[in-house]
Amino acid sequence: MRAIHHAGGGLLTLVSILKLIAEIALLALAGQWVLGLLAGAKRDQNMFYQLLQVVTRPFVSGARMVTPKVVIDRHVPLVAFFLLLFVWIGATIAK
């Protein structure tokens, strides 16, 4: 009986980790968008914007890999945001 309980606890831990990663990435993407609005054309020189780009780069790159080429590069962060949102919703329901 204890092994079954332990396996369920491991799954809960995995779902919690997945949810946490999605939350961090979602907040970083949202922060990058807001900072981009505030900084305007000079956003690429902004140190905090660059830091958020580093955090979100793996997720945006992953979204680029799964999206068709017709999706322009400028929209890929939005695709990444919605993919992460679906992951977060799924993890929240599973938890």
Image (spheres, rainbow, N blue to C red):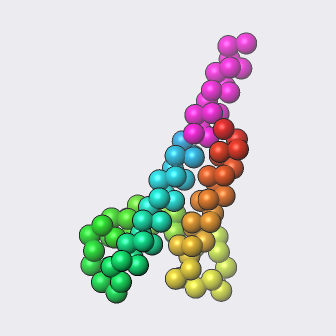
Residue 53 x/y as whole percent: 39, 68
Is 56 magenta? The answer is no
Is 2 magenta? The answer is yes
Please state, as top left, top right, bottom left or bottom right, where the N terminus lies in the image: top right
The residue at the point 42 percent across, 65 percent down is 31
Q: Is residue 43 visible?
A: no
Residue 57 x/y as whole percent: 45, 66
Residue 33, by quadrant, is bottom left
Residue 23 x/y as whole percent: 52, 52
The residue at the point 65 percent across, 86 percent down is 70
Which residue is at the front of the view, 64 or 83? Answer: 83
Residue 92 x/y as whole percent: 65, 45
Which residue is at the front of the view, 74 or 64? Answer: 74
Depicted 93 relative to depicted 80: above or below: above
Q: Is residue 82 visible?
A: yes
Image side of residue 42 versus residue 69, left or right: left
Residues in magenta? Answer: 1-16
